[in-house]
Image (cartoon, helix red, strand yellow):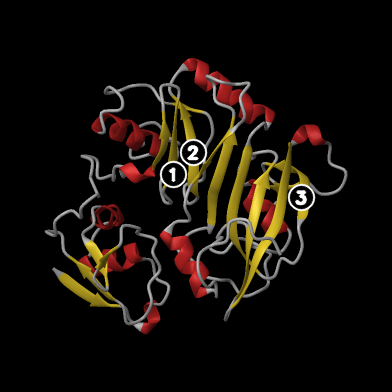
Amino acid sequence: MKTVHVRPEEAQTALGALVKRALELPWSAAKELIARGKVAINGKVVTDPGHRLTPGWAVTIDPKAPTPEGLKTRGDGGVDLERARLLHHDAHLIVVDKPPGVSSVPFEPGERGTLVDRLATALHRWKLAPAKAPLFVVHRLDRETSGVMVFGRTWVAKRHLAGLFRQHALDREYVALVHGRLDAARTVDSVLLDDRGDGLRGSARGKTAPHIGQRAITHLRPIKFLEGEEEATLVAARLETGRQHQIRIHLSEMGHPLVGERVYIRNFDGPRIEAPRVMLHARTLGFTHPAQPEASPRVFEAEIPEDFRLVAKRLGLHGSVPKNEVL
């Protein structure tokens, strides 16, 4: 066991980087120790290698520590889902609360530990599905984004859900922390290009023909101004379309990049607010059920995760994250 106290010059360092340095480990080994619950900050186990550190904190690393209750590990070093993350299941579909820091699906052959892998393993362990039962992917969330995701369990469910996403016939609302003071609701409607001219995805400028990109529509409304030492706004974002990085791009191009943003922030001149990840959470997802397509949509909600609440509190939010309050 080893205890390291965070030095002033290590402020906002990622936990994984400190563990890597302290034990002289490869990055992958440091991440595995953290994911397995072998690292604690001030006595509390932290499983996010991107967790940002504050000077004076005591980081205890104990490779022989018992795995915390409720944190089950897989043979490949990934962490299985906790049962609490299962929001709904039936014979047709699965709704789950995706944790941050986990890829939704593999991005390259052989990638392991993705959400779809962990969910399949967990369903079998919970005796809710046979081993290797199919799960059909119908949408994705970015690795750093947390929140509600749905998977189909049958071809019929997959076709129904995929059609809803293709037709934008779902209710999807995210909550985000953004830089600065967003003082009015607005809708952003743009054509997104894979390369806006600087190597990044972004909105077309001028009279670019829509057929060379994808139309993206985001409805934004401020929920609460956070006027601590660093000015930020808690924002609700409702997607009318669902393009890759759509919310991140639209907010950045408005001059209000997400707190924790590291890609779409090149042209932001204000002070950058540090966070362990992009502060974006898919709070609600509503859709018609494949077995009852004519019935009213069902709406599922995922609670705001702890890392999001901690950053919001640091920025001046008192109490819980509001659900329906509008400025």
Type of amino acid under label 1: Asp
Callouts 1 and 3 close, C-beta under 8 Å: no
- Tell me which residue sits at (49%, 42%) in the image: 148
Q: Nearer the viewer, mark 2 or mark 3?
A: 2
In the rendered image, is residue 200 in sight?
no
Q: In 3D space, how far apart are the residues under numbered discs 1 and 2 (Cα atoms)? A: 6 Å
The residue singled out by tag 2 in the image is 149
Where's residue 288, x and y in %?
59, 28
Q: Earlier in the sequence, mark 1 or mark 3?
A: 1
Q: Earlier in the sequence, mark 2 or mark 3?
A: 2
Left/right of residue 10 with respect to residue 272 in the rendered view? left
Type of amino acid under label 3: Val
Q: Nearer the viewer, mark 1 or mark 3?
A: 1
Callout 3: SS: strand
Callouts 1 and 2 close, C-beta under 8 Å: yes
Q: Earlier in the sequence, mark 1 or mark 2?
A: 1
The residue lying toward the viewer, choosing from 61 and 225, is: 225
Type of amino acid under label 2: Met
Callout 1: SS: strand
The residue singled out by tag 1 in the image is 97
Callouts 2 and 3 close, C-beta under 8 Å: no
The residue singled out by tag 3 in the image is 188
The residue lying toward the viewer, choosing from 220 and 75, is: 220
Quadrant into which the N terminus falls: bottom left
* Residue 317 occupies quadrant: bottom right
